[in-house]
């Protein structure tokens, strides 16, 4: 039988449920909206997205945050479909980070 | 960046993190990646900033109060309740609530059955009706334990039921999204419909709280 | 996977959720595989997520059911009430009827 999907965690042992309210950050809301738009336009569908998340290595999935999984799953699909180049995304992400640090280093 | 904290349960690697102030001071790798991705997609003409902005506004208009309004209406109007149990999406639209999920199934709590909703496989939730789910609902701990030990889980949230009340768990694993219709609390006959809606919290609508008690 | 192409199952029918040994994207959790329950209701016809996940959209929709199971049957160590149940959505091709005079479908 095929192995259990990493997302198929119903019934597995787990600890106390974290109850603190965690407000959504603005970028997270913005990212969800972008995800919704891509899906509405048929760039990818929900099932493809879930399949992309299921391909995450198990250890990475366990440590992952919900919103990062969304971004990563979206990215994987867009790369798979040839819509974006992963190398370009990586270097542009570095550029954004660098600019962010510079901006905040300025008094 | 999220600071270290030494809780010994696993929520620091799950889907929750300490409440952060909005992100003026630090740019996380996740946010940077999103900013870069968005720029690239707009440049390529795949999406426009306006489309995203419009969807953001639409998403923001969804709140648990929309579900609470439906519950309050069902409590005062038996015909509406029948329609709501038959087709939750249509019943929402009837109240002017713009729902985009394919189907919403309303599940009624009774004296014999208490219902609880979970999505073990991901985080399915009627978002265009209620907004974003609470962090606990999307946590891996809830997704794993709610199906296996629902009574222990509910007890952690202060809810217990006698053994002769059936606890029925709904795993939202496919095309349906669920809304729980709680029982109307006793002693509320004098309340107006909007006062009734104020008794119904977000957590009541997935079965993790009872109205009026929060 | 072909649709089962049989009659629509009625509420109350006893069914087994088969483990069809399918690799890749599926929406039938491990914890209900090879378990017996009953049809809670027929939900309707929906496109198969196992196809959609690989970009095959617009395929013929298949029947989806809500299936109700006893918690005592799902978990050997279940701590709760004997009357507790769990309901989830299962696509037609994962189901077979049991306790019937016909062959398992």
Image (cartoon, coloured by chain):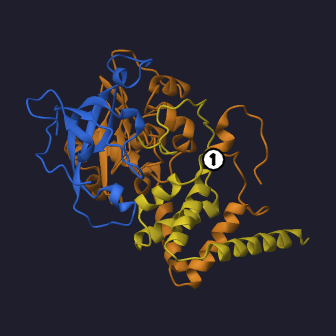
Chain colours: A yellow, B orange, C blue
Question: Which x, y percent locates residue C73?
Answer: 34, 22
Please give the chain letter of the residue carrying mark 1: A
Specify the quadrant of the image occupied by residue C41.
top left
Between C65 and B47, the one lying in front of the other is C65
From what the image shows, is residue B201 above or below residue B47? above
Q: Residues within 10 Å of mark 1 (few under 14, many from 20)?
A: some
Question: Which x, y percent locates residue C74?
Answer: 37, 26
Tell me the element at label 1. Answer: loop
Give the residue drawn at x 66%, y 77%.
Answer: A88
Give the residue drawn at x 27%, y 67%.
Answer: C58
Give the residue drawn at x 52%, y 36%.
Answer: B142
Q: Is residue B41 visible?
A: yes
User: Total label count?
Assistant: 1
Label 1 belongs to which residue?
Answer: A22
Question: Which x, y percent locates residue B165?
Answer: 34, 20
> On the rendered structure, is A84 left or right of C57?
right
Q: Is residue B214 visible?
A: no
On-image quarter of the N terminus of chain C: bottom left
From what the image shows, is residue B123 above or below residue A37? above
Between C23 and B29, the one lying in front of the other is C23
């Amino acid at each position: 039988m095929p192995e259990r999907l990493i997302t198929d965690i119903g019934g597995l042992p787990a600890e106390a449920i974290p109850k603190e309210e965690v407000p959504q950050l603005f970028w997270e809301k913005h990212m969800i909206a972008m995800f919704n738009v891509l899906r509405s336009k048929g760039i990818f569908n929900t099932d493809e997205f879930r399949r992309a998340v299921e391909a995450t290595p198990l250890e990475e999935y366990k440590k992952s945050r919900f919103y990062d999984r969304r971004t990563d799953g979206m990215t994987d699909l867009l790369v798979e479909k040839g819509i974006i180049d992963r190398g370009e995304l990586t270097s542009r992400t570095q550029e954004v980070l660098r600019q962010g640090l510079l901006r905040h280093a300025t008094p | 960046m999220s600071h270290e904290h030494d809780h010994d349960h696993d929520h620091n690697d799950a889907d929750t993190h300490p409440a952060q102030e909005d992100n003026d001071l630090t740019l996380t790798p996740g946010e940077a990646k999103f900013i870069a991705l968005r720029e690239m997609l707009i440049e390529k003409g795949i999406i426009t900033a306006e489309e995203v902005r419009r969807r953001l506004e639409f998403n923001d208009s969804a709140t648990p109060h929309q579900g609470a309004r439906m519950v309050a209406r069902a409590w005062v109007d038996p015909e509406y309740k029948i329609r709501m149990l038959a087709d939750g999406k249509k019943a929402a639209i009837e109240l002017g609530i713009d729902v985009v999920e394919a189907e919403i199934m309303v599940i009624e709590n009774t004296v014999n059955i208490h219902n609880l909703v979970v999505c073990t496989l991901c985080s399915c939730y009627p978002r265009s009706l209620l907004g974003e789910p609470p962090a606990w609902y999307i946590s891996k701990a809830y997704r794993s334990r709610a199906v296996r030990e629902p009574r222990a889980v509910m007890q952690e949230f202060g809810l217990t039921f006698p053994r002769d009340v059936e606890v029925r768990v709904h795993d939202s694993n496919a095309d349906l999204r669920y809304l729980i219709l709680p029982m109307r609390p006793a002693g509320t006959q004098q309340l107006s419909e909007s006062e009734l809606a104020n008794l119904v919290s977000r957590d009541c609508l997935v079965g993790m709280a009872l109205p009026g008690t929060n | 996977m072909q649709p089962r192409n049989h009659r629509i199952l009625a509420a109350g029918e006893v069914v087994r959720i088969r483990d069809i040994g399918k690799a890749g994207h599926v929406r039938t959790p491990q914890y209900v595989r090879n378990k017996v329950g009953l049809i809670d209701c027929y939900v309707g016809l929906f496109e198969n997520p196992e196809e959609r996940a690989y970009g095959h959209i617009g395929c013929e929709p298949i029947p989806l059911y809500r299936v109700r199971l006893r918690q005592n049957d799902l978990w050997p160590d279940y701590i709760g009430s004997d009357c507790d149940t769990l309901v989830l959505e299962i696509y037609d091709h994962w189901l077979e009827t049991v306790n019937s005079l016909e062959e398992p479908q």
